[in-house]
Image: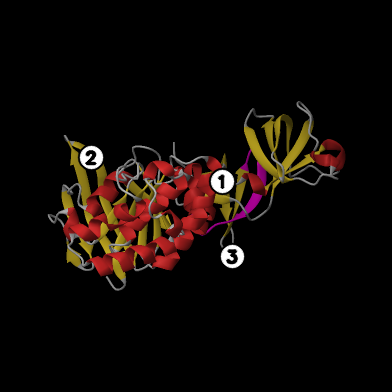
């Protein structure tokens, strides 16, 4: 457990004979920003509550600083939780909200004043010390909730979807501020969200969960570019999932495969055998679109028609219905001088994808 602040070994959680978490094995490093990511009901908040001590596992061990904390109440675990609702005391000022935990610990008045002022500076709220929560914006309230937890100098800060209640623009701003604050504080963060973009932009590592099981643990780049299975591939970002069959295994980690009656060569780090069915994952940004007049040799391309084109400022999302009735998404980077990106509904079109950017996954029914 070197350099690990938190470790879970073989953790199970059941409620009324219904298994919420299944055999969770996880470690969290010192000073790490770790995100638990998954759809609603996958068990990520339950996992957070087990670490905090608000619930106990049905089986397994939970270590904080190498100490098994199963059975210990929350206040003896050196962790603090920031809830989605922030749970600020409405009748107290910002200063008193932050100082509340220190007063409960009977810390001296001088030390309370010094520590609260320091943490207010960190979250850039020193000018708001005497305001009540109702006089603050949503983003400011969130920073107060984090400051209230951080002032107690916890080993781990647990955050249960703290940005969910904010509007889109403020949420984007707070994602940057929260990551910068985590670096400033030097505290280990365990962050819960169902927002894939949020997880990818903020985390050192991401734990992808599905139906109480950890599907994959890795850096944001690993879980996006190298998903372990179909669940991860479909949940992390947009993805085109095609079906294929391995024709033969080649040298240099390559395979020849059949995709929609066309032969392709793809790289893979997995071991496949000839005749095996696979899923072929292609991200929309790796799909290329051409008008029929632009292509002289379409032997390795797929014919279709434009079903939808969505202008997004810097990109155009093109939905193409192929001749086998499958819809493929492509993201084209927009140039205002490029008339080629002015797609019309029903326009005949060719699509292909960047060779080598496919991800081959074991076939799942």
The reply to whether residue 66 is visible in this rendering is: yes
Q: Mark 3–mark 1 contact, CB under 8 Å?
A: no
Q: Earlier in the sequence, mark 2 or mark 1?
A: 2
Mark 2 crowdedness (10 Å alpha carbons): few <14, some 14-19, many ≥20? some
SS at circle 3: loop
Q: Nearer the viewer, residue 363 or 164?
A: 164
SS at circle 2: strand
Q: Which residue is mark 1?
A: 281
Which residue lies at the image location 52% right of the left edge and 45% below the top edge? 170
Mark 3 crowdedness (10 Å alpha carbons): few <14, some 14-19, many ≥20? few
The reply to whether residue 261 is visible in this rendering is: no
Query: How far across and down, in percent of the image, does residue 41 sit?
Result: 33, 37
Q: Which residue is mark 2?
A: 19
**Residue 62 sits in which quadrant?**
bottom left
Q: Mark 2–mark 1 contact, CB under 8 Å?
A: no
Q: Nearer the viewer, residue 274 or 56?
A: 56
Q: Nearer the viewer, residue 102 or 4?
A: 102
SS at circle 1: strand
Q: Quadrant of the N terminus?
A: bottom left
Which residue lies at the image location 42% right of the left edge and 43% below the top edge? 135
């Amino acid at each position: 457990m070197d350099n690990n602040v938190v470790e879970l070994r073989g953790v199970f959680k059941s409620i009324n004979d219904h298994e919420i978490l299944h055999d969770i094995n996880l470690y969290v490093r010192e000073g790490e920003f770790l995100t638990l990511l998954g759809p609603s009901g996958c068990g990520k908040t339950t996992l957070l509550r087990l670490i905090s001590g608000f619930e106990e596992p049905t089986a397994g061990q939970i270590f904080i600083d190498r100490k098994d904390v199963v059975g210990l109440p929350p206040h003896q675990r050196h962790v603090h939780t920031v809830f989605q609702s922030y749970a600020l005391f409405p009748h107290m000022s910002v200063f008193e909200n932050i100082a509340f935990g220190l007063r409960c610990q009977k810390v001296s008045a001088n030390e309370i004043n010094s520590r609260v002022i320091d943490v207010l500076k960190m979250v850039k709220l020193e000018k708001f010390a005497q305001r009540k929560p109702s006089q603050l914006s949503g983003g400011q309230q969130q920073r107060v909730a984090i400051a209230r937890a951080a002032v107690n100098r916890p080993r781990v800060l647990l955050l249960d979807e703290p940005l969910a209640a904010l509007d889109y623009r403020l949420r984007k701003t707070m994602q940057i501020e929260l990551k910068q604050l985590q670096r400033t504080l030097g505290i280990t963060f365990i962050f819960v969200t169902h927002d894939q973009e949020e997880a990818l932009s903020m985390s050192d590592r991401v734990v992808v969960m599905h139906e109480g099981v950890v599907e994959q643990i890795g850096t944001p780049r690993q879980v996006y570019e190298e998903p372990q299975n179909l669940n991860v591939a479909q949940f992390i970002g947009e993805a085109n999932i095609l079906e294929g069959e391995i024709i033969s295994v080649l040298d240099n980690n390559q395979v020849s495969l059949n995709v929609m009656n066309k032969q392709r060569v793809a790289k893979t780090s997995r071991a496949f055998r000839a005749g095996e069915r696979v899923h072929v994952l292609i991200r929309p940004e790796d799909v290329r679109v051409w008008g029929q007049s632009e292509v002289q040799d379409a032997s390795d391309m797929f014919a279709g028609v434009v079903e939808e084109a969505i202008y997004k400022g810097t990109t155009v999302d093109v939905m193409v219905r192929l001749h086998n009735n499958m819809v493929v998404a492509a993201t084209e980077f927009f140039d205002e001088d490029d008339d080629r990106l002015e797609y019309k509904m029903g326009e005949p079109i060719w699509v292909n994808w960047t060779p080598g950017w496919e991800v081959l996954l074991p076939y799942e029914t």
